[in-house]
Amino acid sequence: MQKHSMIIPVASDHAGFEAKRQVIEILEQMGHLPVDFGTHSPESVDYPDFAVLVAKKVNDEENPNGILICGSGQGMCIAANKYPNVRAALVYSEKSARLSRQHNDANILCLPGKELDRQQLQEIVKVWLDTDFEGGRHQRRVEKIRFINDK
């Protein structure tokens, strides 16, 4: 069951540029409105400069979800998770997409652009956006993560 249309900020570095173009098309086909925060070419850039553009939108609750793509997905994920209200998840399969939402209430999807083909990207994005947080025992765990820096 498709959820309502959302505005979704998306960004990549040069290594994720081609996958980002595909993800934007996939989001549009799903009826969402992706907002492209760059990079806008395959020329070398620094991924943290683009991770912060999406992470800030999600952290400040301007957008409920975002998508970041670099070669491995790791760099974007590490940078985005510097924000206290961000739960960025490195996702590489439908199963990891589902679990990152059900158990971790992930709000930024980080993708390894060099590792996934268009069909895999489509399946992961769909599952990630269509999966709800289960709450329950997982809510307590997510709350503990939120307050780690308060100790």
Image (spheres, rainbow, N blue to C red):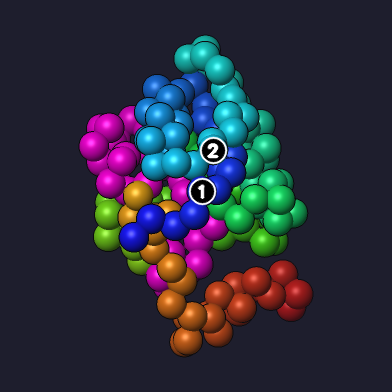
Q: Which residue is located at x 49 percent, y 54 percent?
A: 4
Q: Which residues are magenta?
A: 101-125
Q: Is residue 121 highlighted in magenta?
A: yes
In the image, residue 106 lies at what x, y percent? 50, 61
In the image, residue 131 lies at what x, y percent? 39, 63
In this rendering, would 44 be left or right of 85? left
Count of number-bearing discs = 2
Helix, strand or loop for disc 2: strand
Q: Can you tell which quarter of the image residue 147 is in?
A: bottom right
- The residue labelled by disc 1 is 5
Q: Quadrant of the C terminus?
A: bottom right
Q: Is residue 108 highlighted in magenta?
A: yes
Disc 2 to disc 1: CB gap under 8 Å: yes
- The residue labelled by disc 2 is 33
Q: Which residue is located at x 59 percent, y 25 percent?
A: 38
Q: Is residue 129 above or below residue 28?
A: below
**Disc on the earlier residue, 2 or 1:** 1
Q: Which residue is located at x 67 percent, y 40 percent?
A: 52
- Label 2 environment density (alpha carbons within 10 Å; few <14, some 14–19, many ≥20): some
